[in-house]
Image (spheres, rainbow, N blue to C red):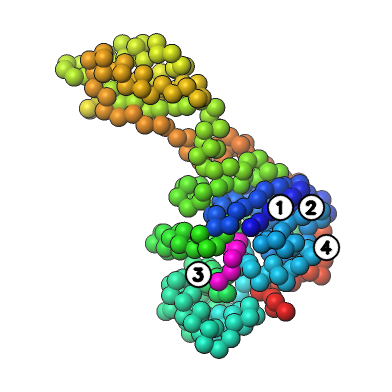
Amino acid sequence: MITVTDLTKRYARTTAVDHISFSVSKGQIVGFLGPNGAGKTTTMRMLTCFFPPTSGKATVAGFDVFEHPLEVKKRIGYLPEAPPLYIEMETIEYLRFVGRLKGLAGADLEKRVDYVCDRCAIADVKNKLLGKLSKGYRQRVGLAQAIIHNPDVLILDEPTAGLDPKQIIETRELIRSLAGDHTIILSTHILPEVEQTCEQVIIIDKGKLVATDSVQNLQARARGVESMLVEVAPRTGNLVTVVVQQRLAKIAGVSSVVLKEERGRGSVFEVESDQGKLVRGDLARAIVESGWDLNELRPSAMSLEEIFLELTGSDAAAAERKSDQPGEPATSKDAKPEAPEAEA
Ligand SMILES: Nc1ncnc2c1ncn2[C@@H]1O[C@H](COP(=O)(O)OP(=O)(O)OP(=O)(O)O)[C@@H](O)[C@H]1O
Ligand SMILES: [Mg+2]
């Protein structure tokens, strides 16, 4: 549904996006991650035809963003980092306005306006001026305008930024419910959100692609070893943890056994084995045959946060590098506010 090949965007002094390539299949939800200044917003702006790439290519639903921007825009809903706002318009007026720009009219338009007001929980601010909305409500209106024309592809730049916890959950659910029919790329700094919402992850850093994979594969790849948490309990009396450690370490394929935690009911060990060596059965057998109880045996996943820091370097501040300059003079296209545009 989306293919990006060697996409590059250079500003005067900064290469904001540096030859990145990835693809997203229909119906997928993809998390777009990277430290501040990594180039996420710049990539999204190219995908939504907000400005053209310096070089490289991107297609959405088979249409080139550079050659067929109108076809692309018809199929895309975009929630920009700063939601577009016409402060003097009422919410409902604004949604009708955007809907008309996207080609909706009459009863269809009204139906969609009602639908998005309901889905984004903004019915109670329908008649409020946008300029008077709180940040969270503005964000919700931004999401509503992005989905008003029921686009195939949604590009959401930090969709949950500024929302209250309840609305964050509702927005996540809304996004999840849109998947399947819609292809979604969302950027966020909330990593558990990606684990909960997205199947695929694209990580960029300093304009370069550092990873694109499923959350699961990334976790496995980042470790290079398989890691399991094993809770062992004594059947009677006390458990001598050193003995357990020594016993488990003897199993073929096990590379390390570390005592992680002593719980009331048992002791938890982290057991690492070489990737691809399935030692779970041997572990379970060794524990039971030694006369201990096996309370729990589960893979210990590396959190996305750990992976992210490992892949992008923990010094996120360094990302807002070089470019303390205002950048290239905006082209006439760049200078436009990030607002919906007419399709035809
Ligand atoms: N109009 C511009 N002129 C010059 N440089 C720019 C411009 N817009 C962005 N940049 C630079 O391009 C790089 C990428 O910025 P971008 O906004 O795409 O990052 P981001 O990943 O969205 O960051 P954040 O997480 O902070 O939103 C940064 O170094 C930024 O300073
Ligand atoms: Mg951004």
Q: Earlier in the sequence, mark 3 or mark 4?
A: 3
**Residue at mark 2:** 56
| Distance from the alpha carbon under mark 2 to that under mark 3 | 33 Å
Report if the CB atoms under discs 2 and 1 are less than 8 Å apart. yes
- Secondary structure found at label 2: strand
**Residue at mark 1:** 4
Q: Residues within 10 Å of mark 1 (few under 14, many from 20)?
A: many
Q: Which mark is residue 329?
A: 4
- The part of the chain drawn in magenta is 150-155
| Distance from the alpha carbon under mark 2 to that under mark 1 | 8 Å
Q: With respect to residue 211, does 26 lie above or below?
A: below
x, y percent for residue 199: 51, 48
Q: Residues within 10 Å of mark 4 (few under 14, many from 20)?
A: few
| Distance from the alpha carbon under mark 4 to that under mark 2 | 21 Å
Nearer to me, 334 or 58? 58
Q: Is residue 152 on the magenta stretch? A: yes
Q: With respect to residue 303, does 183 lie above or below?
A: below
Q: Residue furthest left?
A: 236
Q: Which mark is residue 140?
A: 3
Q: Residue at x 52, y 33 (%)?
A: 220
x, y percent for residue 213: 58, 42
- Secondary structure found at label 3: helix
Q: Is residue 22 visible?
A: yes
Image side of residue 199 versus residue 264, left or right: right
x, y percent for residue 5: 74, 50
Nearer to me, 195 or 319? 195
Report if the CB atoms under discs 3 and 4 are less than 8 Å apart. no
Q: Quadrant of ligand 1?
A: bottom right
- Amino acid, disc 4: Pro
Q: With respect to residue 205, does 288 lie above or below?
A: above
Query: Which is in the foreground here, disc 4 or disc 2?
Result: 2
Q: Earlier in the sequence, mark 2 or mark 1?
A: 1
